[in-house]
Image (spheres, helix red, strand yellow):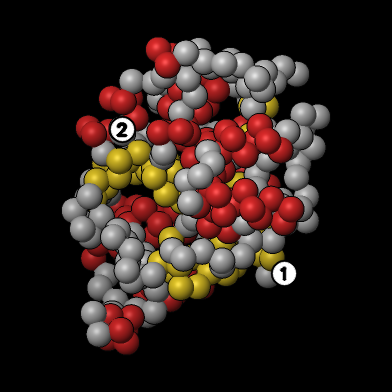
Amino acid sequence: MPTNNRHVSHDAADSIDPSEQSGFFGARLSATVILLRDGLSGLEVWMQERVLSMPNYPGLTVFPGGGVDSRDFPPRAWDDGELWLGRSAISVARQTGVTKYKAHALMFAAVRELFEETGTLLAVDDDGVLLADARPFHDHRLKLESHELSLTDVLRESNLNVHADLLRPAARWVGRSERGNWFDTFTFVAANPEGQEPDAHTGEADDANWFPPQLLLDGWRHGLVRLAPSTWAQLTELLAFDTVEDVLAAAGASLAPVIGDPVDDPRYREFFTFVPVDRIGKRYGI
C-alpha cells in the first residue's frame, strides 16, 4: 500500500507550469462525474438543472462538475502515494492521454466538485475503507465552495485519501458553451457510496435528483429537458447498461477526445437533426 506523506513541504520551484493547467488548444480544463445507483426500476443517474444566472450552460441539465482549479494540481515533486490510493496516477494518465500531474488534477477536481455540489465525498481512510457518512465534513464542504480550503487541505485535515478506483474515466469532450467558451471536459463514472446520499444544496442548480437515463432523454425529446451534446451522448450510452457494476466494468478503454460538434457522426445524428419544442424557454421567457 502506498505511503501517505502528509507533512511533506514543497518548494515553490516544484509547482506546475501554468501552461500545463489548460486543456486541448487552451480550452478550460474541467471534470464531471456521472454518479450512478441501482434504482428499483434500473440504473439511475444524479442530475442537476443549472440556474439561469450561470455564465455557461444556464438552464441545462448536467452532471455535477466544474473547472479544474490550480490547487487541484500536485507540486512537481509530488509523491505518487500522497493522498492517493488505488490505481496509480500513471495508469490514469495513460488512459486519459495526459500527464500524471494533469491526471491528479482531474481526479481531484472530480472529487472536489462532486462534494461541493452534492455533498457526496468519494474518499477513503488510510486502510482504504470508503467513507460512509460525509455529513461530519459539511464545514469542509462550505470552505471548499468559498475557496478557503483546497481538496488537498481537506484530505490532510481529515486523514482521508482519493481512491482512484472509485472514479473511472469514461469520456472526453472538447466543446464550446452557448456563451462561446471552450471546455476540455473529462467525464468520470462513479457508484454512489453506500451510506451517503447526494443533496441539492448548491447555488449552481435549481433542482437535482435521481433519474433513469431514458426519462431524461424522453424529456429532451418533449422539450422539457435541455442537454448539451456531450450529456445527451453519455445518457444515450447508459441505456446499454442494466447495473452500475456493468457501467464501471466497461469504463476501461483509452479516451479518444470528441472535438467540436460531431454533426457527421451517426452516433449523435439524432441530437443534431431532431429539434424539440423549447418548452423551458417559453416558460421562463428566454
Residue 10: horizontal and vertical position, in percent? 52, 15
- Which residue is pictured at 66% across the width and 32% down the height? 156
Q: Is residue 262 left or right of residue 62?
A: left
In the figure, 251 relative to 82: above or below? Answer: below
Q: Residues within 10 Å of mark 1 (few under 14, many from 20)?
A: few
Q: Nearer the viewer, residue 143 or 216?
A: 143
Name the mark on residue 40: 1
Tell me if residue 73 can be seen: yes
Of circles 2 and 1, the one toward us is 2
Q: Residues within 10 Å of mark 2 (few under 14, many from 20)?
A: some
**C-alpha span from label 2 to label 1:** 41 Å
- Which residue is pictured at 30% across the width and 41% down the height? 28
Q: Are marks 2 and 1 in contact (CB under 8 Å)?
A: no
* Amino acid at pointer 2: Ser
* Amino acid at pointer 1: Leu
Q: Secondary structure at mark 2?
A: loop
Instruction: Point out the tag, 2 or 1, that comes first from the N-terminus.
Output: 2
Q: Secondary structure at mark 1?
A: loop
Residue 70: horizontal and vertical position, in percent? 40, 33
Q: Which residue is mark 2?
A: 22
